[in-house]
Structures are given as structure tokens and as C-alpha cells.
Image (tube, helix red, strand yellow):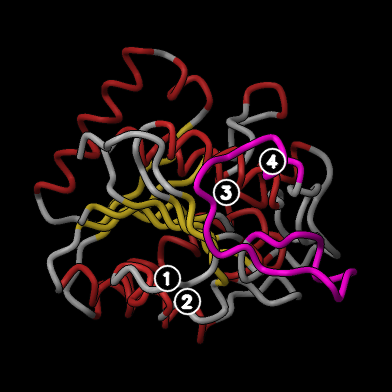
């Protein structure tokens, strides 16, 4: 299959903002093994601002745009160095694509992105995509990497989109505050009732909560791509997800895909 995996800042880093080495190593090992099994993988990775803030020893995630951009510039270097090193150890070549809102909104730029991604996959590379936070501002951002991952999944005609986060999936309520919350295993359609289950922002280190993941699921499933939201604490869960086993919350495609 052609699979897009999105991983969030809270999955990649410790609360300090520093890299969670054990988890990232497990993620890269799993991605490499899935590629060895014949799957085509695209990774949409957050983490540049969070890692940059940690490396710059900032007290927390920056609030002003200039410091966010500076942290992203520092963090993106470290992020890609880690991916290149770890995936290179398994003999896989990575490629970096940093995108802005204009890139995905302009027809010509978007076509160029699709062409580049398609060629990279043909050449056996593993594209790693992130929003270009060094130049993006609040007014010209895609908004979050959940949405970006859905756009990428549609662009590459993926057959599966996996959103790895810090929660097991979609719940009937916030499990962090409501002990009666139940995990929703299957979502046949994104109804208003399902969309209402989405909350606000996630952790202090990230920008996306369940609401952005449901929005991403709506984009992807409408294009015929099933979506799974799962806990990234154990990246090895990707094996079971790809095998079709019940992990997290699975959103059914709303029409036949084109991949």
C-alpha cells in the first residue's frame, strides 16, 4: 500500500521539548521495515518548533511569530538529521519537503508538489513533509499538520492515512477528564454528532487536538482514503494498522479510492 503517516510533536518529544529517542528510533525502524515489506511510505512530521525550543533552552513553546520561526529553523535541522541518520541505518533514503499554505492552495505549485512526491516514491525515497514554519505566519499557515497530512494523502493518492497522537483514538468524551469516556473503534461516516466529539488543542507542545484530526479525516475519507487515529506511544502499532487489525479509531472511506 501507499501509506501516509502523521506524527505529532507530543509523540516525538518529551515534556522538556527534547527528542524522545527511544520512540523516534522505534518509529524509524517500523517505517523502514514496512518499506522493506513493499509499502510506499510518506511521513508528515511535526516537531520542528518543539525541538528547536528545547535545543534553544526556551522555557516553553514560543508565542510570538519571530521566536516560533527561529525555533523552527533550529529544530528542523535536528529533526531531519535524526530521520536521515536513523532511516539511513536501515538503508533508506529520506527527502525533505517544507510546504506553505500558498504551495497547497496554488494549482501550479500543488501540481509541482504532486509530481515531486510521485517521483520520490518511484525512486524509493521516503518523503518527510512538514509545514515551513520558518516563513509561515498565522495568516498564511495551513494551520496544522493533521490537515497537511490529509492534503498530502490526497496528493499522493494514498490508500491509508494514519494519524499517530498521544491518545488511543476518538472517545465519546475527553478521557483525561471523564472516566466514563469510551473509545470509538469504527466510524462509518463523519456525522455532525461525530464531529462534535472533537475538542480544542491538544498538549502544550502541539497545535492540534481531536478537532483537527476529525477535519483531516473528513478530507481524506471524502477522497476515498480510510483514516486511522492511534496512539503513537508504540509506533510498532503501525504493523497491526497496516494489517487491518483493530487499533485506535478507523474512519471508513466515503467513496472508492483512486490509488
How far from the left and from the top, in percent, is residue 33? 23, 77
How far from the left and from the top, in percent, is residue 120? 18, 45
Task: Provide the residue span drawn in magenta.
Answer: 170-196
User: Circles 1 and 2: CB distance less than 8 Å?
Assistant: yes
- Dot 1 falls on a residue whose secondary structure is helix
Q: Which residue is mark 1?
A: 82
Q: Tell me the crowding category of disc 1: few under 14, some 14 to 19, or many 20 or more residues within 10 angstroms, Cα based.
A: some
Task: Measure the C-alpha gap from mark 1 to mark 2.
Answer: 9 Å
Mark in front: 2 vs 4: 4
- Dot 3 falls on a residue whose secondary structure is helix
Q: Which residue is mark 3?
A: 73
Q: Which residue is mark 2?
A: 24
Nearer to me, 176 or 46: 176
Q: Tell me the crowding category of disc 2: few under 14, some 14 to 19, or many 20 or more residues within 10 angstroms, Cα based.
A: many
- Residue beneath the point at 61% across and 64% down: 169
Task: Measure the C-alpha gap from mark 2 to mark 3.
Answer: 20 Å
- Dot 2 falls on a residue whose secondary structure is helix
**Mark 1 or mark 4: which comes first in sequence?**
1
| 130 left or right, relative to 201 | left
Amino acid at each position: 500500500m501507499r501509506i501516509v503517516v502523521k506524527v505529532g510533536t507530543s509523540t516525538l518529544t518529551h515534556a522538556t521539548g527534547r527528542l524522545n529517542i527511544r520512540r523516534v528510533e522505534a518509529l524509524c525502524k517500523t517505517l523502514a521495515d514496512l518499506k522493506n515489506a513493499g509499502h510506499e511510505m510518506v511521513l508528515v512530521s511535526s516537531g520542528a518548533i518543539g525541538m528547536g525550543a528545547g535545543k534553544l533552552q526556551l522555557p516553553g513553546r514560543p508565542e510570538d511569530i519571530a521566536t516560533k520561526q527561529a525555533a523552527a529553523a533550529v529544530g528542523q535541522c535536528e529533526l531531519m538529521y535524526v530521520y536521515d541518520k536513523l532511516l539511513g541505518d536501515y538503508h533508506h533514503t529520506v527527502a525533505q519537503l517544507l510546504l506553505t499554505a500558498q504551495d497547497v492552495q496554488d494549482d501550479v505549485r500543488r501540481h509541482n508538489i504532486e509530481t515531486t512526491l510521485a517521483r520520490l516514491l518511484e525512486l524509493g525515497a521516503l518523503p518527510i513533509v512538514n509545514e515551513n514554519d520558518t516563513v509561515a505566519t498565522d495568516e498564511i499557515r495551513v494551520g496544522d499538520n493533521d490537515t497537511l497530512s490529509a492534503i498530502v494523502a490526497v496528493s499522493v493518492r494514498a490508500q491509508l492515512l494514519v494519524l499517530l497522537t498521544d491518545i488511543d483514538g476518538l472517545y465519546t468524551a475527553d478521557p483525561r477528564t471523564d472516566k466514563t469516556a469510551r473509545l470509538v473503534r469504527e466510524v462509518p461516516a463523519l456525522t455532525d454528532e461525530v464531529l462534535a466529539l472533537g475538542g480544542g488543542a491538544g498538549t502544550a507542545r502541539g497545535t492540534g487536538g481531536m478537532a483537527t484530526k476529525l477535519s483531516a479525516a473528513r478530507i481524506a475519507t471524502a477522497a476515498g482514503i480510510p483514516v486511522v487515529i492511534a496512539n503513537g506511544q508504540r509506533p510498532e502499532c503501525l504493523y497491526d494498522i497496516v494489517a487491518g487489525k483493530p487499533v485506535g479509531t478507523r474512519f471508513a472511506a466515503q467513496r472508492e479510492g483512486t490509488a
